Amino acid sequence: MTMNHITWAVVPAGGSSQRFGGGDKLLAALAGEPVLAHTLNALANYSGLAGIVVAAPADKVLAYQAQFGEMIQGVAVRWVAGGETRRASVDAGLRALPMDCDSVIIHDAARPLLTGDLLDAVLAPIHEGAAAGAIVGIPCTDTLKQVGAQASAPASADYHLARVAAPVMATVPRNTVWHVQTPQAFKRDMLEQAHATVALEIPVTDDAQLLELLASQHQVPADSCQVVVVPGHERNLKITTPNDMALAEWWLTQG
């Protein structure tokens, strides 16, 4: 018998836009609409979604709420203040979910070209009971080097001007490496357990990593924390620099 699942999306929207070159990238116009509007509309268009929680910077919550509203295409949108980190923002979003929600999608506010196919792909393993989490990604095709700790990425978009030099330590086998995107889907109870259990001082870059740590550091059975990866798409880019806006505009012209 197929179980009826209630799925909400949590959208962390607290980025600083530091590398965007000025202004709030979520309000930047993409094909005539703010980036965030594209993201929220893509989620609201998905028939399997019951609602959306947006975790925005505390000083922007009311402005975002006034601009985008509490209902988009018939889908409820809740606005909450996010935290200082992505993890804190997601945690704030989880706390705003209704009690009957049993599965959750985490999706970056700055990924405006989300499609229903990607949402189907990450939700299927969760709703079928095959995994606790599912993420989208693209197999790596570049050569990857592990470098010394003194290497750091520049804050600006002009990487070629940064003159960062660091010793190469090893070559990472690329056949085992994927570039990970969002959406990411999870069983709500497992994601909440991971947020509550994994120490806050441990740096994490996505929610899937929290489930990995739950299994490796807290004696939770690995099969109950299993995360799987499904193929994403290069169209599903994240807006970080002005160049990303130009590429997103091009993808929109491709239909």
Image: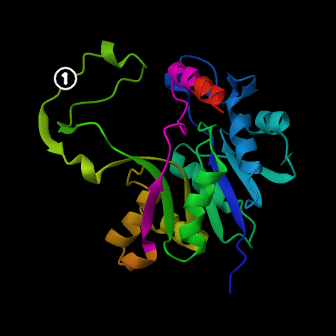
Quarter of the image where the N terminus is located: bottom right
Q: Please say whether residue 106 is visible from this viewpoint.
A: no
Q: Can you identify the residue that label 1 sits on?
A: 165
Give neighbour class at mark 1: few <14, some 14-19, many 20+ (Cα, 10 Å): few
Q: Position of residue 112 (x, y in %)?
A: 64, 37
Element assignment for label 1 = loop
Where 116 falls versus 190 (above or below)? above
Residue at the location (17% across, 36% down)?
148
Image location of residue 217, percent across then percent down: 33, 70
- Spot occupied by residue 89 in the image (x, y as percentages of width and height): 59, 49
Report the residue that reaches farthest toward the front: 254
Q: Residue at x 79, y 50 (%)?
A: 77
110 falls in the magenta region = no
Q: Nearer the viewer, residue 225 or 210?
A: 225
Query: How many tags in the picture?
Result: 1
User: Label 1 sits on what residue type?
Assistant: Ala
Q: Which residues are magenta?
A: 225-247
Identify which residue, 146 or 84, lies in the foreground: 146
Location of the C terminus by quadrant is top right
**Quick check: 39 left or right of 195?**
right
Q: Is residue 128 left or right of residue 40?
A: left
Above or below, 222 against 168 in this view is below
As drawn, the residue found furthest toward the top would be 161
Please provide percent x and percent y for residue 102. Answer: 66, 72
- Let me know if residue 227 is in the magenta part: yes
| Residue 66 image-quadrant placement | top right
